[in-house]
Amino acid sequence: HLSIRRQRQMCIRDSIEEIRRQGWVIIDQELEVSLRSIAVPLKDSAGQVLAALNVGTHVGRVSRQELESRFLPILLEASHELSTRLFQ
């Protein structure tokens, strides 16, 4: 059977692959209780991630759904514009 360490490594790799496919991530109280955040990458012309944009909020102020529907489109647009201006 797989060791717990190996299982965790596989789980982390799977999570990273899903985030790469999706192109953004929401962290919902995983780093700190009551903190919810969303992040998008800034990429160079080769598609290499060089930085990220992140917005964090208290869970009582902004729902996970609102992060996706309201904040994500703005962050993705800003990410594209900044990536183009800074890295291409």
Image (cartoon, rainbow, N blue to C red):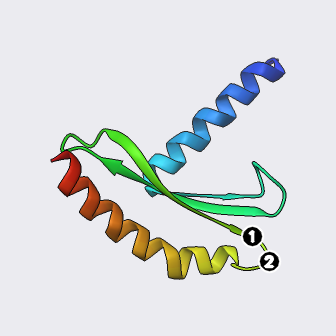
Type of residue at label 1?
Answer: His
32 vs 15, left or right, is right
Q: Residue at x 61, y 81 (%)?
A: 66
Image location of residue 30, percent across then percent down: 76, 51
Left or right side of 16 for 51 = left
Provide the residue designation for mark 1: 58
Does residue 11 lie above or below 70 as drawn?
Answer: above
Q: Quadrant of residue 61?
A: bottom right
In the displayed structure image, the side of residue 54 where residue 42 appears, left or right: left
Q: Position of residue 71 (x, y in %)?
A: 51, 76
Which residue is painted at 77% across and 71% down in the image?
59
Instruction: Please tell me how crowded label 2 is: few (under 14), some (14-19), or many (20+) other residues with Cα within 10 Å.
Output: few
Q: Quadrant of the N terminus?
A: top right
- On residue 60, the disc is 2
Identify the residue at horizontal 70%, vertical 63% (top origin): 36
Q: Residue furthest left?
A: 88
Residue 79's place in the image compared with 31, above or below, is below
